[in-house]
Amino acid sequence: MNSIAEILFIVFSCFVFSAIFLFAVFSCLEKEKRALTVSVLAIVFGAGLFILAWSFFNPIFFLFFIGILILFGIYSILPLSPATSVRIVSEPGQYDERDIMFARALYIEGGDAYRDYYFRFPHRKQTDDLIRSLPEMLQSGGRFYEPAVALVAAGYFEQVKAIYPFVSRRPAGTKTAQDPEKITGMVKKMTFALGAIDVGVAKVSPHLWYSHVGRGPGSYGERIFLPHHFVIVFAVPMVWEAVKKAPGMPVIAESAKRYWKSGVIAVTMAAWIRSMGYQARAHIDGNYRMILPAAGAAAGLGEIGRIGLLIHPVYGPCMRLGAVSTDMPLCVDKPVTFGVQEFCLLCTKCALNCPSGAISFGGKKVILGVEKWSTNQEACYRYWRTVGTDCGICLRVCPYSKPDNIPHRMIRAVIRRSAVARRLAVYGENLFYGKRIYRGGE
Ligand code: SF4
Ligand code: SF4
């Protein structure tokens, strides 16, 4: 028994050391200094423990220890507490685009929109006036303003505006009959071919589109009616190296580039669908009718987390969404659940690092019939206007943003099904990457 226990001990030690070494290698590739340092320290500490345990080796004690560890491992990965989805409490209501900060930022004193909006919501006037008095995004005066990078971002945003005329047009005269299954497959293939990393289809329901126009084409306050039955939602990844520079200017240049990319994909898809005789409208940056995070969740691209954004199973929140709504019959996808609701309850890293206090540390609330975390859009946008970028610290610190490689993939696989693994993952995240990453403050 002695020699079996000794062999087991050596195999077990090799396994543990290899796992930590592998993690250290990936941390080095990811340029995560803290994770690399902790891994190296764990190897050194582990080597000391190994020598000590080998010197006083007790087979009974070791077999008992390994037995407990195996039982714990099995318990951790058993689907005893599987992921749950977002709870719909009552018929979901529609969100009014006039209420979003991007629309409110455009209301000019003396204008009709300004008069109407603050007549209805006088308590929002002071905050909004203050925000509007701050420097415009990408303009000098923002804390992280860098002229050259700002010009790159502004260039991409200009390109997005240049494709607005292609967002919605008349379809070709005759409808070509399409088999829904076949055409859905083609739609997805084409979206991938154009550069998306994921795509899904949802049935359009009223809570997925805004009730009234707040910005973009159309008149302020106009009731929105979307005569489409399906929405194709897709994701375009953001480059992690740029996100890691949040809240500096490279992050807004990266966002702008991805908005442009998703815009090009959306208008191309919409034009193709219209050429088959069906209606199609692209939903792109600054020109939305649909609420893309909600549509993305319905189309099975991810789950909405504490951060208030869609979290993708592989790319986390590090992506930008685009969409095309259409009356062409398509096959719909199911929403996905992979543990975000439970993980976000334990992890409050985005809230802890958010410099504006816009992300809640608390539990979910029922908002327009859906149970979710609420975020303070005024505080968030005010910070954007203070720093002159779209911040992105919450994207940078979210554990789901970590690159898609073996260690992170394994962690995501276990937190999908096990409450113990989720708790351990939160401890591990804080130990290896630090709890408080951004200390810039407001
Ligand atoms: S973008 Fe920045 S300010 Fe806004 S919620 Fe995220 S961390 Fe907070
Ligand atoms: S940082 Fe943590 S709490 Fe925030 S969205 Fe990501 S996983 Fe959820």
Image (cartoon, rainbow, N blue to C red):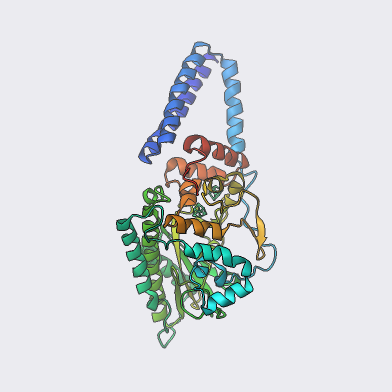
Relative image position of residue 9 (x, y in whole percent): 50, 21
The answer to whether 293 appears left or right of 262 in the picture is: right
Relative image position of residue 399 (x, y in whole percent): 50, 45
Locate the N terminus and report the quarter of the image it occupies: top right
Q: Is 265 in front, or is 252?
A: 252
Q: Can you say whether 412 is above or below 424 in the image?
A: below
Relative image position of residue 368 (x, y in whole percent): 65, 66
Q: Quadrant of residue 235?
A: bottom left
Q: How many callouts does the rendering have?
A: 0
Outermost residue, bottom side: 173
Q: Quadrant of residue 150?
A: bottom left
Q: Is residue 200 visible?
A: no
The answer to whether 307 appears left or right of 148 in the picture is: right
Q: Is 173 in front, or is 58?
A: 173
Outermost residue, left side: 148
Q: Can you say whether 294 is above or below 210 in the image?
A: above
Outermost residue, top side: 55
Relative image position of residue 335 (x, y in whole percent): 56, 60
Q: Is 138 in front, or is 292?
A: 138
Residue drawn at point x = 39 percent, y = 57 percent: 141
Q: Is 171 in front, or is 6?
A: 171
Q: Is residue 322 visible?
A: yes
Residue drawn at point x = 46 percent, y = 56 percent: 386
